Image: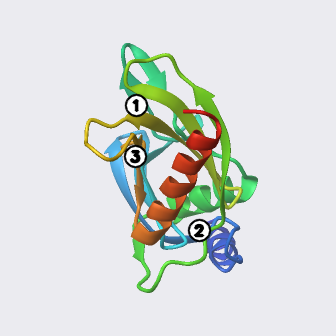
Amino acid sequence: MRLKSFFLLALLLAAPAGAAELTAWEIKVSSPSVLSGDFVFAGALEVKGVEMRSEGLFMPAEEFGGRTYRDVKLLSRTAYAALDAAFKAGGSRKKAGKSGRVSWTVKELRRMGGKSRKANVDVDFDGDLLVTAGLVLSKRGGEKYWIAWPRSFVFLDKKLKKTVEDAILKRAAKEGL
């Protein structure tokens, strides 16, 4: 079984960019029946706190106002299989190098009625991850909004972050926000 997981993992890691390319991960035991992992996609995006339980794979969640929000979602079976294989391989893997090419699309902007959070914005990364960010009123002079990303999602490539945020702000302006 371990050999089968190794070959599946090698196949997934050799997949072309845009196909759930995992470049690094670290797996820890959270409790006797739960593994927790942090994963880097294409050297550019990190998702922290993914859990593998006996029931399956769980993406990170945030609690706010008595509700649970899952703002990072898997979109493809390839991404699920890559995470599953990494959990089965265990341990950690760090791959040095530049970030790979990541394609992304601002999918949907949903207006909100809150005092500071004016919209939720879905961004699709490589057809593998869907991340919901918040468009929040800025209290700083010169900027109307700032983008609130989930705590479990980190841009390792700062240029990519700026490009995506600029596109979100442009889309918000186009939609009258």
Label 2 amino acid?
Answer: Arg
Residue 161: % across, % down: 46, 61
Which residue has dot 1 on it? Answer: 62
Residue 37 sits above or below residue 159 on the image: above
- In the picture, measured across the screen, residue 136 lies left or right of residue 108, that is left
Which mark is drawn over residue 51? none
Q: Which residue lies furthest to the front in this view?
A: 142
Given this view, does label 1 or label 2 mark the residue nearer the observer? 1
Residue 111 sits above or below residue 148 on the image: above
Residue 105 sits above or below residue 69 on the image: below
Which residue has dot 2 on it? Answer: 2
Label 3 amino acid?
Answer: Ser
Mark 2, Cα crowd under 10 Å, few <14 / some 14-19 / many 20+, is: few
How far apart marks 1 and 3 lie (CA) works out to 8 Å
Which mark is drawn over residue 152? 3
Residue at (46% x, 37% y) in the render: 135
**Which quadrant is the N terminus positioned in?**
bottom right
- In the picture, measured across the screen, residue 162 lies left or right of residue 54, that is left
Q: In which quarter of the image is residue 14?
A: bottom right
Residue 73 seen in this snapshot:
no
